[in-house]
Image (tube, helix red, strand yellow):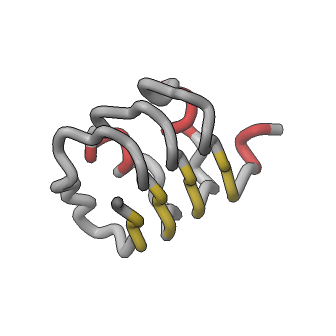
């Protein structure tokens, strides 16, 4: 089922936000949300993705790119 997803590519979908269900995918290690219309990502939400090692948020109108991910060692792509 969806809980087994390790990679999720939501790029080029004109998304303005991410559904809360995305942050319940505990096995996710790669999340690509590039080329959307996302203006905000909450570090608290991303912190639920404990296995996340790659986060691509390039080409989004993010208002705050200072995401403090705490214990995460995440390669984050910004534009």
Give residue 37's quadrant in the image.
Answer: top left
Question: x%, y% of residue 26?
Answer: 57, 49
Question: x%, y% of residue 41?
Answer: 31, 39
Question: x%, y% of residue 10?
Answer: 63, 41
Q: Residue furthest right?
A: 1
Give the side of residue 73 with respect to residue 67, left or right.
right
Residue occupying image coordinates x 47% and y 52%: 49
Please, is residue 6 above or below residue 9 in the view?
A: below
Quarter of the image with the C terminus is bottom left
Residue occupying image coordinates x 35% and y 61%: 78
Give residue 16's quadrant in the image.
Answer: top left
Residue occupying image coordinates x 49% and y 69%: 53
Of residues 62 and 29, the one drawn nearer to the viewer in this rendering: 62
Q: How many marks?
A: 0
Residue occupying image coordinates x 48% and y 58%: 56
Please, is residue 9 above or below residue 16 in the view?
A: below
């Amino acid at each position: 089922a969806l809980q087994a997803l390790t990679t999720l590519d939501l790029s080029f979908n004109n998304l303005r936000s991410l559904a809360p269900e995305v942050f319940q995918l505990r096995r996710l290690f790669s999340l690509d949300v590039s080329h959307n219309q996302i203006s905000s990502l909450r570090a608290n939400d991303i912190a639920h993705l404990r296995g996340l090692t790659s986060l691509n948020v390039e080409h989004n109108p993010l208002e705050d790119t200072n995401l403090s991910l705490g214990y995460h060692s995440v390669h984050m792509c910004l534009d």
